Structures are given as structure tokens and as C-alpha cells.
Amino acid sequence: MSAYKDQDPRLHGIKTKIRVVPNFPKSGLMFLDITTLLLDPKAFKDTIDLFVERYKGKNISVVAGIEARGFIFGPPIALAIGAKFVPLRKPKKLPGKVISQEYILEYGRDCLEMHVGAVEPGERALVVDDLIATGGTLCAAMDLLERVGAEVVECACVIELPELKGRERLNGKPLCVLVEYVDI
């Protein structure tokens, strides 16, 4: 399900730099830690480069990063493709007027917010996060952008957990993923 069917050799290097932490943040869970990827300049650069190669020349004017790890990958992608970066934040983190989108999680509810006027009708947007699991956060981000008239071109995540079927919740919206983790 990776966007890179030809198995670009950089993908292996990226995957080997993502640490799997058992029983974090609670017993029975396996946490995929991207901080170890960030510690390796080559793997981090390869991650950004793969996304930039995919989106350069696609007339994307907005890269929307989901708090918090979308803030790590989104800005360098935005700069490289000549787009603005728009942070999608948790509630009460942005000053001024915001537009909000609530969504349901496996364990409750959450909300994303962005500044009113940050995205204009007709702009082409890319949504960036580190991981897609059940897809709820990506769906909320797309809904938020589409409510203000943006066209969400694609979602981009470093990691996918395909067993959680998050891709299916995206209603056919394209999703670019660099690495997948199955049976973790």
C-alpha cells in the first residue's frame, strides 16, 4: 500500500530508523517512535525528499500539518514545494479566530483547529502527519480544510498501520505512505 511500489532503496533506511517501543504509552500497545528517525540526518532528509519529489510541481499551495508530528514533516515539505504551512492544532492553542472540527477517537473525542483565513477557497492542500492508524485525525483535517473551500489533493504519512483500516475511512482520498507496519 506504499506509494513507492518500486521500493526506493531509501525506504529501507527510513524504516530501520523508526523505533518500536513495546507497552508505551500503556501496556499492550506498540509505539512507533519517529524521534529515532529524526536523529539520523540522512534518514530524515530521505523522508522529506521522497515527499518533495512526489509533490513538487503539483500546484499545492497549502501544506497542513497535524499537531504535533505533522509540524516536524510539514514545514520542510512546504518550503521545498513553495507552499505555505498551516498548523492544525489542538483546541485553545491558536490565538485569534479559529474554525474547529471535532472527531471521534477510539477512546473519546478530540478537535482540530486552524486560523480563520489561513486557507482560502480553491487552494490545493496536502495534509501531513507522521502516522495513519484508524484515520480519524486525517478525516477531521480534510473536513476542516474542505469546509473553507480547499481542495485536499492528498494525505501524506510516514507510517501506516494497515490492519487498523484507516485508509478505508478516507473515502477514496489518495494517501501516500512511506512505510507500513503489520503485526506489531
Image (cartoon, helix red, strand yellow):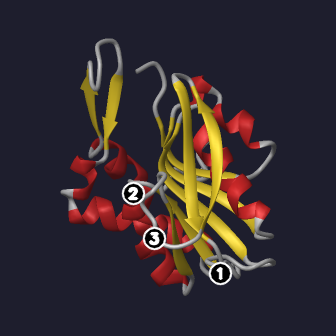
In screen coordinates, is 162 left or right of 42?
right
Residue 130 location in percent, x, y?
44, 50
Q: List the residue tagged with mark 3.
A: 95
Marks 2 and 1 close (CB-CB < 8 Å) = no
Q: List the residue tagged with mark 1.
A: 61
**Neighbour class for label 1 at 10 Å: few (<14), some, many (≥20)?**
many
Q: Mark 1 against mark 3, which lies toward the viewer?
A: 3
Which quarter of the picture shows residue 147?
Answer: bottom right
Give the amino acid at mark 2: Arg
Give the amino acid at mark 1: Ser
Q: List the residue tagged with mark 2.
A: 10
The N terminus: image quadrant:
top right
Residue 54 location in percent, x, y?
59, 69
Marks 1 and 3 close (CB-CB < 8 Å) = no
Residue nearest the viewer, comparing 59 with 71: 71
State the CA–CA distance, disc 2 to disc 3: 39 Å
Marks 2 and 3 close (CB-CB < 8 Å) = no
